[in-house]
Amino acid sequence: MRTSNIFFMFEPIMVLLAAVIGFGVSLDVAHAEEPVKGAAKQVDLNRDVALEIVFIPPGEFKMGSTAAEKEWAVGQEGGAKFSSGGGAREAYEGESRSMQVKNGFWMGRTEVTVGQFRRFADETGYISDAEKPGGTTMCFDLNWIPNHTNTGKPPHPWVNMKDKSWRDPNHGMDQKENFPVVCVSYHDMKAFCTWLTKKERATGSLPDGLTYRLPTEAEWAYACRGGRRDSSYYWWGNDLNDAKGRLNISAIDFLPGKDHVWTGSKLPWSDGYAMVSPVDHYGKRGRNGFGLADMCGGVWEFTLDHFDPIGGHEDLHYEDAELSSVSRPVCRGGNFYDVPGNARCAVRLGIQSVSYSDSRDGFRVCLGVPRETNGSER
């Protein structure tokens, strides 16, 4: 089904001060100030490839969703009744409850792109899980013929493939360097973050006490809402009519090489792409209150946490706390194939394993206090 050990502990102000000094901002230490919300930094990956991160201050937010939101998600406008089991998946969100992110952190403005991941693979010779002998990844079946009889049970358009990977995810369109990288696993994502940490540390650009990693589920959920403290469906509010030009989900866009759209298409306008769209394609309108792009729709984004079907946690959640183990990572935010009800801020699923990959799944980096997990095969 798609369903902490902390090496170092720092006071929030010390973490924030380290982040500022590490990014070359001149400060009078006696009057040090934390970075402002939305402050941005370009991380040079060399060969004209860069990755942009933005600062997100500590704060409170709502994890989960209300009963009214769950009802809307599976209703006519949300459209998730059939695709998510008539409300079973919405139960994973848990009830709307207040949580707090105590430390500020930096987060990728966009998902990691094909070009950025390629820099990592080229420099290290890294082989992704899907590329290893016997490896597979879930991709779109280009021969898929949808069932438009409104039964709620169209043929499934996703199949496991042996010869596909992040280099060619079988989207049926040319792979572009500014597309979000997909078909990468939890293992692959963590390897990218480890490489980036070592690379930045070697150049003296990494702030003391911070490391690149996946965000915790709480950090991701807080970042997705863009500073809102309510339990709105999306980072801009509840109005689906205001979604145009903000996100890529199932809409009126012909599938590659075909004359029909996704069976579950619910939006009466084109968002420009039936499959993945370039990151930050929608510009400022597609960015939330923290300046993060594509937080809803686009591609699912992995977090560090182990999936708890009851709901997300404020602290990093493990399958086994003593072993810091994670075997079923959490992904958040929905993807280009999803209906509106499946691409809200509160949406969450559990991934099959730490080696599983999918052409609908990607990730974005977080720079923050170290949070370590050990991925276990299941």
Image (spheres, rainbow, N blue to C red):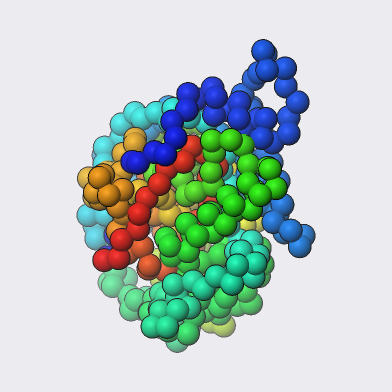
Quadrant including the C terminus: bottom left
List x then y, in percent, for residue 294.
Answer: 55, 51
Give the answer, above or below, for where 159 lies relative to 247: below
At 31% from the left and 54% from the top, the residue drawn is: 326
Res. 378 in view:
yes
Res. 144 in view:
no
List x then y, in percent, for residue 264.
Answer: 40, 66
Q: Say whether residue 126 is left or right of residue 233.
A: right
Q: Residue furthest top?
A: 30
Quadrant including the N terminus: bottom left
Q: Say whether residue 335 is left or right of residue 96.
A: right
Give the answer, above or below, for where 288 lies relative to 282: above
At 31% from the left and 31% from the top, the residue drawn is: 97
Quadrant in which residue 159 is drawn:
bottom left
Foreground residue, 255 or 106? 106
At 47% from the left and 49% from the top, the residue drawn is: 214
At 48% from the left and 23% from the top, the residue drawn is: 11
Foreground residue, 286 or 25? 25
Q: Say whether residue 307 is left or right of residue 114.
A: left
Q: Say whether residue 306 is left or right of residue 335.
A: left
Foreground residue, 131 or 72? 131
Foreground residue, 240 or 286? 286
List x then y, in percent, for residue 102.
Answer: 44, 27
Give the answer, above or below, for where 358 lies relative to 323: below
Q: Residue furthest front?
A: 202
